[in-house]
């Protein structure tokens, strides 16, 4: 009972930075969108949508922590890990749609040319955004999770990057307040849209690749196959398949044509090497005597 309580408390502490970050950023997004309307600023609106990417990243990372603790079932033998892939793809698609909205509003505003923009509101709201992002990042730094958890590290970097975008919005607000150049606002919103596209496009491609059971980014398929083919007592490799079961985990199946000297110790060494050197969390290997298999590798 004591061990279960300690484990539950550990899981709660692990989730705390995500939940705090999600809560703070959601409250800020709502406020920023209201003030964007009051200030007549597409740059603030764009910054709010970019903050949505923060929340989506935090939710995705929190989801990974949450679903990895759920047990697999007979119908879902890998558990719910691949929900992180689906969430990542949906997040990227929604952000790309949001960019289209940002650019449309920016073009309309540039063509109008007479819209008033309140630079003072932009400055103060964007400054609050900087504080919110740094505060959210602080809770990750305090927990130390970003040092060993890839999801936490990604969320941490995303928060710091968004603080940088908010700095750019502050600068635009200062320029508008002192010069009255309202055209700066839609130009800044276009630039923020470009930042969102650049940061989201790679995520979208990787998510699509994972949805199609492609080899996850960062895994050296050629090097992995070479390692297996050149392992002592292994004569051939075929039916090699590598795919992602979540945004952070990969699985592998393979048939190895082996000599009679191949034993359980070799199999264990291969499995451990694939896990530690190639990032394969789940490995299934079928061994057959070399003379009984087709020697053609994939």
Image: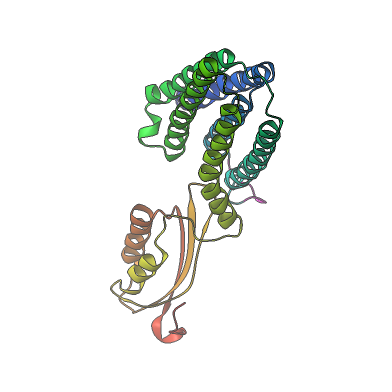
Q: Nearer the viewer, residue 135 or 235?
A: 135
The residue sitting at the left extreme is 232
Residue 273 in picture, x, y percent from top left: 33, 58
Q: Nearer the viewer, residue 263 or 32?
A: 32
Q: Nearer the viewer, residue 240 or 260?
A: 240
Does any portion of residue 4 appear in the rendered image? Answer: no
Does any portion of residue 96 appear in the rendered image? Answer: yes
Residue 40 in picture, x, y percent from top left: 67, 21
State left or right for residue 228 relative to residue 11: left
| 75 in magenta | yes
Residue 291 in picture, x, y percent from top left: 41, 86
Give above or below for 5 relative to 229: above
Give above or below for 259 relative to 84: below
Q: Quadrant of residue 181?
A: top right
Q: Read off the magenta span.
A: 71-76
State left or right for residue 45 relative to residue 217: right
Residue 178 in picture, x, y percent from top left: 51, 15
Give above or below for 153 relative to 271: above
Question: Number of labelled discs?
Answer: 0
Q: Quadrant of residue 227?
A: bottom left
Q: Main secondary structure of the magenta part?
A: loop
Q: Quadrant of residue 180?
A: top right
| 103 in magenta | no
Q: Residue at x 40, y 53 (%)?
A: 279
Give the colouring mode of the picture: rainbow
State left or right for residue 25 relative to residue 218: right
């Amino acid at each position: 009972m004591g061990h279960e309580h300690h484990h539950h408390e550990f899981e709660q502490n692990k989730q705390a930075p995500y939940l705090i970050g999600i809560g703070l950023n959601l409250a800020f997004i709502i406020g920023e969108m209201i003030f964007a309307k009051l200030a007549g600023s597409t740059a603030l609106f764009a910054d709010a949508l970019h903050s949505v990417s923060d929340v989506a990243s935090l939710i995705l990372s929190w989801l990974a922590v949450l679903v990895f603790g759920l047990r697999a079932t007979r119908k879902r033998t890998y558990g719910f890990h691949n929900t992180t892939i689906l969430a990542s793809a949906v997040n990227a698609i929604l952000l790309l749609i949001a960019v289209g909205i940002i650019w449309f509003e920016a073009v309309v505003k540039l063509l109008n040319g007479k819209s008033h923009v309140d630079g003072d509101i932009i400055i103060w709201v964007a400054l609050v955004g900087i504080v919110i992002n740094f505060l959210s990042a602080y809770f990750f730094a305090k927990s130390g999770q970003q040092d060993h958890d890839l999801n936490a590290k990604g969320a941490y970097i995303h928060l710091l990057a968004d603080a940088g975008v908010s700095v750019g919005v502050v600068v635009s607000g200062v320029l508008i307040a002192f010069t009255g150049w309202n055209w700066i606002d839609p130009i800044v919103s276009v630039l923020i849209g470009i930042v969102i596209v650049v940061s989201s496009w790679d995520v979208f491609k990787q998510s699509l690749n994972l949805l199609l059971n492609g080899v996850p980014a960062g895994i050296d398929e050629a090097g992995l196959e070479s390692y297996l083919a050149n392992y002592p007592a292994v004569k051939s490799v075929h039916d090699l398949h590598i795919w992602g079961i979540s945004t952070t985990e990969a699985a592998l199946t393979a048939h190895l044509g082996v000599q009679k000297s191949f034993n359980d110790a070799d199999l264990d060494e291969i499995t451990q090497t694939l896990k530690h050197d190639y990032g394969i969390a789940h490995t299934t290997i079928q061994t057959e005597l070399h003379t009984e298999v087709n020697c053609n590798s994939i």
